[in-house]
Image (cartoon, rainbow, N blue to C red):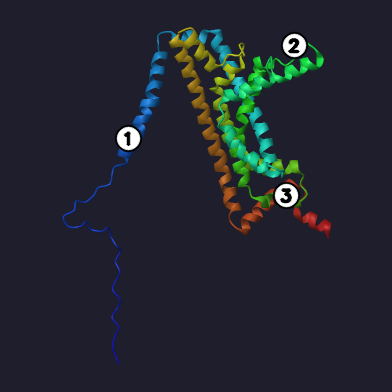
């Protein structure tokens, strides 16, 4: 049987289905129409009140009067040093605690890690009240001291000082640093730790040369968040009863509620907002530079055997001597 096979029909790419006869074609909704409702809600809820604050602060002579006052300068210095000290304390304490939870096995470690999320939901004044129950003038620590020694008063009176405010802020904001650190440690390549340990590196050297570089973006994220929150913290300073500690939020409260000087209060509020936004912009810049510089190394580590050799070369510096010399020494 002699016959020729017909060539297969040429396939054409399927185009959009034609609308049914008598049915109008549906046009896609423009993107700006979807974005309009949330933008409008944001403008009404946030931008309009902020514009009113800025307009009130532009009263004649308001900025000059506020900037010339000693109370504003003292509040600015107190706010900055408290926020910087609390951020440094939270970074150090949060890094150590996250290391222990992530890399030191102990009973209940997973429950402790999960409880951090619950701690983040607590209001700031609740932690301050807890510290008052323990270290307040009539707290448990002073009560035990007076019962044991027979003294009329206890020695713990630091909660009404700047050091008490600093302790309360570090206690409350440390979990905000631990949360991103634990997330970063969970994604850490354990092969780097094993290579460094096999080369004889001690735990502190492994932390400094392997773990800390991996944790820098998480530290930057947590530290910037804590810094901005400390700059705007009001409840901790109020509930500690530290009358000699006046921060910018406390100055806004005093000017607006106690003195009814709304123009001065708005000036201080605008300064506080400018500082917070500037620090947030600096944080974004630092994170972009940090993550951008590390992108090449991350791609190399994810490139199979070649990436693992790159990770091994990185971690050899944590072990001290090169790998070849240790192999020759063993031989």
- The quarter holding residue 80 reads top right
Up-down relation of residue 83 to residue 219 (above or below) = above
Left/right of residue 247 with respect to residue 48 in the rendered view:
right
Q: Residue at x 41, y 17 (%)?
A: 53
For the residue pair 251 and 160, the one nearer the viewer reads as 160
In this view, the mark in front (1 or 3): 1
Residue under circle 2?
153
Res 39 seen here: yes
Q: Residue at x 37, y 23 (%)?
A: 48
Q: Position of residue 13 (x, y in %)?
A: 30, 64
**Cα distance in 3D space between marks 3 and 2:** 54 Å
Residue under circle 1?
36
Label 1, secondary structure: give it.
Answer: helix
- Of mark 3 and mark 2, the one earlier in the sequence is 2
Residue under circle 3?
196
* Quadrant placement of the C terminus: bottom right
- Of mark 1 and mark 3, the one earlier in the sequence is 1
Q: Position of residue 294 (x, y in %)?
A: 58, 44
Within 10 Å of disc 2 (Cα), the crowding (few <14, some 14-19, many 20+) is some
């Amino acid at each position: 049987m002699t016959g020729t096979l017909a060539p297969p029909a040429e396939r054409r790419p399927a185009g959009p289905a034609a609308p049914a006869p008598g049915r109008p074609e549906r046009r896609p909704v423009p993107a700006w129409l979807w974005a309009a409702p949330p933008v409008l809600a944001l403008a009404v809820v946030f931008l309009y009140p902020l514009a009113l604050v800025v307009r009130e602060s532009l009263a004649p002579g308001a900025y000059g009067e506020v900037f010339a006052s000693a109370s504003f300068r003292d509040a600015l210095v107190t706010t900055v040093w408290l926020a910087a000290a609390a951020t440094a304390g939270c970074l150090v304490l949060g890094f150590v605690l996250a290391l222990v939870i992530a890399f030191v096995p102990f009973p209940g470690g997973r429950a402790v890690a999960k409880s951090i999320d619950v701690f983040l939901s607590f209001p700031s004044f609740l932690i301050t009240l807890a510290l008052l129950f323990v270290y307040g003038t009539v707290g448990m620590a002073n009560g035990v001291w007076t019962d044991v020694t027979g003294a009329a008063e206890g020695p713990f009176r630091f909660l009404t000082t700047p050091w008490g405010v600093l302790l309360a802020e570090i206690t409350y904001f440390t979990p905000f640093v631990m949360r991103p650190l634990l997330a970063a440690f969970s994604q850490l390549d354990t092969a780097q730790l094993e290579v460094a340990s096999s080369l004889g590196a001690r735990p502190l050297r492994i932390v400094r040369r392997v773990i800390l570089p991996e944790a820098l973006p998480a530290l930057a994220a947590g530290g910037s968040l804590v810094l901005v929150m400390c700059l705007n913290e009001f409840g901790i300073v109020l509930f500690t009863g530290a009358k000699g500690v006046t921060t910018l939020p406390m100055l806004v409260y005093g000017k607006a509620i106690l003195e009814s000087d709304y123009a001065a209060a708005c000036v201080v509020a605008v300064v506080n907002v400018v500082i917070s936004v500037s620090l947030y912009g600096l944080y974004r810049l630092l994170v972009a530079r940090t993550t951008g510089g590390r992108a090449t190394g991350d791609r190399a580590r994810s490139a199979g055997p070649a990436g693992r050799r790159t990770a091994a070369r990185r971690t050899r510096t944590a072990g001290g001597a090169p790998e070849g010399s240790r192999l020759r020494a063993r031989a």
